[in-house]
Each structure stands twice: as structure tokens, then as C-alpha cells.
Image (cartoon, helix red, strand yellow):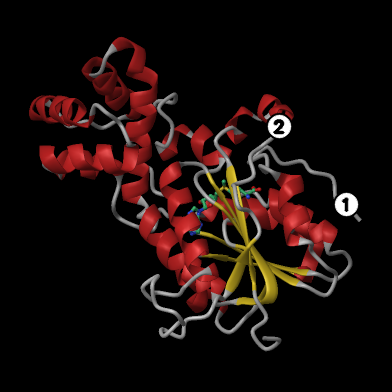
Amino acid sequence: MPIESNSVFHVPVLAKEVISQLEPKSSGCYLDSTIGGGGHARLILDASFPDGRLYGIDQDEEAIRAASHALKPYGSRVRLRQGNFRAVREIYKKSTFDGILLDLGVSSHQLNTPGRGFSCDRDGPLDMRMDRRNALQAAHLLATLSETDLAMAFRDFGETHFSRQIAKAIITQRAKAPVRTTTELAEIVRKAVPLRRERKSVVQVFQALRIMVNDELGALSKGLKELFSMLLPGGRMVVICFHSLDDRIVKNYFAELADPCICPPDLPVCGCGRIPQAKVLTRKPVRPSRAEIESNPRSRPALLRVVERLDLRKA
Ligand SMILES: C[S@@+](CC[C@H](N)C(=O)[O-])C[C@H]1O[C@@H](n2cnc3c(N)ncnc32)[C@H](O)[C@@H]1O
């Protein structure tokens, strides 16, 4: 029994693909580890009608508030908790799941709210915290990191070719006055790079800062392991990434689950005893269709990967 969507908090990306991979069932229990506005969660609940259960996590209290409101009609089928998915075992203790979803990155709501500081197109404070109970904000990084550390961060987390020029421009600017707003930062970056690379460089710098403020790569590396350990045999984990740094972590972790053997290739039989834990269902990542990109341009970079946990009792 579908419930009408009234949410503009976030349009769920690759929605059909997520549902066809998770195959939600009425008796099942599912975990949406990045619940956002509850867009995917609602579809999982509809597909697992009448009594499939949905557990949700988000580190952003505004997401939890929005999802609680959007999913109210589903009553006791839904449980939501604010927290980081890296700590899922502390949040949902001994629970196990038939399917797990991770839809990484920021929500449209976070991007569109100037006060959160995520978007280079909206003037606001350089905050960028998804969980505002944490202390570290982007402005603090810009004020305290050395020129070398800033350059390394822009190179490693933003993948920009102009990391040194941008870091130098920030150091020069902050000697005059602290860099406090998104508009100020965007302007510094624009002036530091060649004309044709302005927009891309600004986006890359914002991405690098956001990744650092939220320790996104650390959370993903730990979270994937914790989440997989709560997946039931035969259950699937679906992950949507929006940049290559996240996607590389997911791809490598899935490959390790499917082929964990560490024996030298010339050893005739396996001696390490590590056996495959999962089957990768997406050799190449699934991408949004042209129609989806047209109707929701923010879906463009999305890359979806899926693993299925093997039932080792059958082996
Ligand atoms: C792209 S949105 C998810 C949108 C959601 N699928 C929907 O349909 O509305 C990503 C969400 O993940 C949350 N998030 C990102 N990293 C997280 C983490 N490590 N732990 C918990 N939540 C996280 C963000 O706060 C954001 O609300």
C-alpha cells in the first residue's frame, strides 16, 4: 500500500535499482544506514508490505526528524536512531538484517540549507558537519592546517590538480583575515586556478573539506565491515557512491569479501584458509539512466554496487 510522497528533502537516486537488488519481503528486516529524508526507506517499506521492518540511521538530526515525519504512517514497522553507521553495532546491538542500504554523501536538504555550509553556491558559514554534535568545522581546518597539509588534503580528498596553488592562496588570505564563509572560500579558489577550471576546483575543494570534517572515508571503511557482519546469509548490501574515493573503498572491500585468499598465486592449494564470504552481484557499477539524470541532475555521478552474503552453512 504505497503512501504518497510529499518530501522535497531528497529525491532518492537509483530507486528502482535499489528495490530490485534488495528484493524486500514482507517478513524481512532492512537497514537503511543513511536514511536522509526517508525516500528509499519508504520504497522498501512499500515493497515489504504488510509487515517488513525498516531500521534507519543518520548522523544528522535534521534527517532523523524529516524521516520520522515522512515514515510516521508506517507506525511500528519503523525504528530510527541518530548516529554514525560506523557505530551500527552499538546502535542496533545484536540485530541482523535481510538487506542493508548505504546511500552515501550529502542530501539535497543539507546542500540546499545555507547555514550548513555544504554548498559553494549558497552563502553560509564554513561548517559542513553532518553531525552537529561534533566540534570540528571546515573553518577550523582552513584556519589551522599547514600549507602542506592543506595541499595534501585538496589533492587526496578533492583530487584537484591545483592543490598547491589553492593551499598557498588560502594561507595568504588567512594571514589578512580568517576565511569564514562559503562565498569567501569559493572566491579564493576561483582566483587561484585557471579560468576554465574554476567551477570544478571549487567543487573539489568543498568535497575535500567535507570528507575531512566528517571523516567520511574512515567511517565508510569501518562501517562496511560492521554492516556486513550484521547481514544475514543470502542478504544483500547495496551501496551508492558519488565519488571515486568512496567507490574505490567499496569496490576493494567487496572484492576482498568475494576473494579473501592471500596465498601466493603459485601455491597449488590454498593454505591461508580464508574462504569467500560474499558474491559480488555487480561486476561493473550500476549508473543512473539518461532519463533519471535529466529529471534529477544530482544523480549523475551515482555508482551502485551490490554484494550478497553467502550461506556458509550450505557449503
Ligand atoms: C544521500 S543522503 C541519503 C538520502 C536517502 N537515501 C533518501 O532517499 O532520502 C545521505 C545521508 O547520509 C547521511 N550520512 C552520511 N554519512 C553518514 C554516516 N557515516 N553515518 C550516518 N549517516 C551518514 C547524511 O547525513 C545524509 O543524510
Of 231 and 142, the residue lying toward us = 231
Q: Which residue is mark 1?
A: 2
Q: Quadrant of residue 165?
A: top left
**SS for dot 2:** helix
What is the x, y in percent for residue 208?
A: 33, 40
Q: CA distance from mark 2 to mark 1?
A: 21 Å
Q: Quadrant of the N terminus?
A: bottom right
Q: Mark 1 or mark 2, which is nearer the start of the sequence?
A: 1
Label at residue 292: 2
What is the x, y in percent for residue 17?
A: 73, 48
Question: Compared to 250, does 295 lie above or below?
Answer: above
Residue found at the far bottom of this picture: 313
Q: Is mark 1 within 8 Å of ligand 1?
A: no
Say if residue 100 shows up in the picture. no
Residue contact at pointers 2 and 1, CB within 8 angstroms:
no
Q: Quadrant of residue 177?
A: top left
Q: Residue at x 50, y 36 (%)?
A: 111
Q: Amino acid at mark 1?
A: Pro
Left/right of residue 19 with respect to residue 223 in the rendered view: right
Q: Residue at x 71, y 56 (%)?
A: 41
Label at residue 88: none
Question: Compared to 183, does 158 lie above or below?
Answer: below
Disc number lying in front (2 or 1): 2
Number of disc labels:
2
